[in-house]
């Protein structure tokens, strides 16, 4: 525990980094996967389960919590940590992703964004200053700048316009954030798939001397190869001694390859969303429990897993639950998926410490390639 925000780099293996982010509410072991708790809940999971799986931090969303229950109400109830019974670090996304995903329900100008609620049609305004204010009312530990995320493909002119405005908003967010002991505000690198814009964004944000940096605007329509190319271009322009967070990513393969390039933190809805739709992530790759071939398969997902969902239930039963649209099916597969993601992160951290990350990555990919039809 510490009363300040600190990033300590403990080991490197090539460009892969093993470190810790220390904050008053706890330590985050990096590389880290942050389960997404958009509206104060990691869907289909108890937060005690999420912690037991190895999560040091979860993510909440400023836009969605702004709509309900409302930041002022959360503050009156003691803050988000107390409300949801999670006493550990929380990172809040600023609402920038919704600038893209809800483009049909918002109006954007230099001052900020006016959203029309997807729930009841009511109007809500969010400026960079209001985004930081909301995150403060939520009592978030790591707060993200408001930015404009552009879905790819897009024209270079549109990407540049959004990137430049995001830089101006980063400066305004830094001023609004001020000095909050023990907390951090991260800037977000934009620039789409244009290398020169990515470098310009990263260098400008580095000049603001923030406590951490995120790479945004990837995994939004571009192939994986483009995402990895942008990381190769962007990361050398960011400070070596600050945490690097790749937003909204991703698949286990995305994370392995991004760690190899120097990323420290990830979040993604994929493990929870996939679980609710019958898809399991395992050390033998993806398993679609909707498929009829599982109907009489007595094998568990993985008899070597420490997670009861993976180890103690037959594929036949999981298939039945998913096909019958029973809530328990999504709960068990979500539990399995988050367990796999946290086990993968633990394996990555150990491999970096041991100087064998490349071997670990190759062995993991070979296991995925074997598939789940062979005995586990």
Image (cartoon, helix red, strand yellow):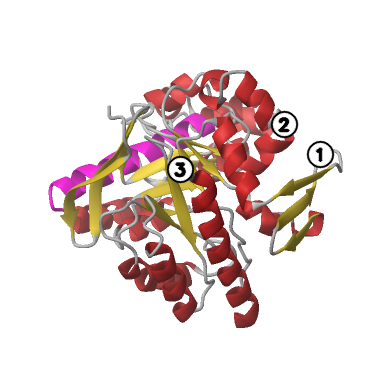
Residue drawn where x is 62% and y is 27% of the image: 321
Cα gap from disc 3 to disc 1, whole angstroms: 32 Å
Q: Residues within 10 Å of mark 3 (few under 14, many from 20)?
A: many
- Label 2 residue SS: loop
The residue singled out by tag 2 in the image is 68
Distance between the Cα atoms at labels 3 and 2?
Answer: 31 Å
Q: CA distance from mark 2 to mark 1?
A: 10 Å
Relative horizontal placement of residue 356, taking residue 247 as reference (left or right)? left
Residue 248 drawn above or below residue 207 = above
| Mark before the other along the chain sequence, 3 or 2 | 2
Q: Quadrant of residue 375?
A: top left
Asked if marks 3 and 2 touch (Cβ < 8 Å), the reply is no
Q: Which residue is mark 1?
A: 119
Q: Closest to the observer: 181 or 53?
A: 181
Q: Is residue 2 rendered magenta in the image? A: no
Examine the rendering and report whether any part of residue 228 can be seen. Answer: no
- First along the sequence among labels 3 and 1: 1
Label disc, if present, on residue 281 of the rendered structure: 3
Magenta-tinted stretch: 333-356
- Between residue 176 and residue 8, name the one nearer to us: 176
Residue at 81 percent across and 39 percent down: it is 119
Residue under the point 36% across and 59% down: 258
Q: Is residue 328 depicted above or below 125 in this figure?
A: above
């Amino acid at each position: 525990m510490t009363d300040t925000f600190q990033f300590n780099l403990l080991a490197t293996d090539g460009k892969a980094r093993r470190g810790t982010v220390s904050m008053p509410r706890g330590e985050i072991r990096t590389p880290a996967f942050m389960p997404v708790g958009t509206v104060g809940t990691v869907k289909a999971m108890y937060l005690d389960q999420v912690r037991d799986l190895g999560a040091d931090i979860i993510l909440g969303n400023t836009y969605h919590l702004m709509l309900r229950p409302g930041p002022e109400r959360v503050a009156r109830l003691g803050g988000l940590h107390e409300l949801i019974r999670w006493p550990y670090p929380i990172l809040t996304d600023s609402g920038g992703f919704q600038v893209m995903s809800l483009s049909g329900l918002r109006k954007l100008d230099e001052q900020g964004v006016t959203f029309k609620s997807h729930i009841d049609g009511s109007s809500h305004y969010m400026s960079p200053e209001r985004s930081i204010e909301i995150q403060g009312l939520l009592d978030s530990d790591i707060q993200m700048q408001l930015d404009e995320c552009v879905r790819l493909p897009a024209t270079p002119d549109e990407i540049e316009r959004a990137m430049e405005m995001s830089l101006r908003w980063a400066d305004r967010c830094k001023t609004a954030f001020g000095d909050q002991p023990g907390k951090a505000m991260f800037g977000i690198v934009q620039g789409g798939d244009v290398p020169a814009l990515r470098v310009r964004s990263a260098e400008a944000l580095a000049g603001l001397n923030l406590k951490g940096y995120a790479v945004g605007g990837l995994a939004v329509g571009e192939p994986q190869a483009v995402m990895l190319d942008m990381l190769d271009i962007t990361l050398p322009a960011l400070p070596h001694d600050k945490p690097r967070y790749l937003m909204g990513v991703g698949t286990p393969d995305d994370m392995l390859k991004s760690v190899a390039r120097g990323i420290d933190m990830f979040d993604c809805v994929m493990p929870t969303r996939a679980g609710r739709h019958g898809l399991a992530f395992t050390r033998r790759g993806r398993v679609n429990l909707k498929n009829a071939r599982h109907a009489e398969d007595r094998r568990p997902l993985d008899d070597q897993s420490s997670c009861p969902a993976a180890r103690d239930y037959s594929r036949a039963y999981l298939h039945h639950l998913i096909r019958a649209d029973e809530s328990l099916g999504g709960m068990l597969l979500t539990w399995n998926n988050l367990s796999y993601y946290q086990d993968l992160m633990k394996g990555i951290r150990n491999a970096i410490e041991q100087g064998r990350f490349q071997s670990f990555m190759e062995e993991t990919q070979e296991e995925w390639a074997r598939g789940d039809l062979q005995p586990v």
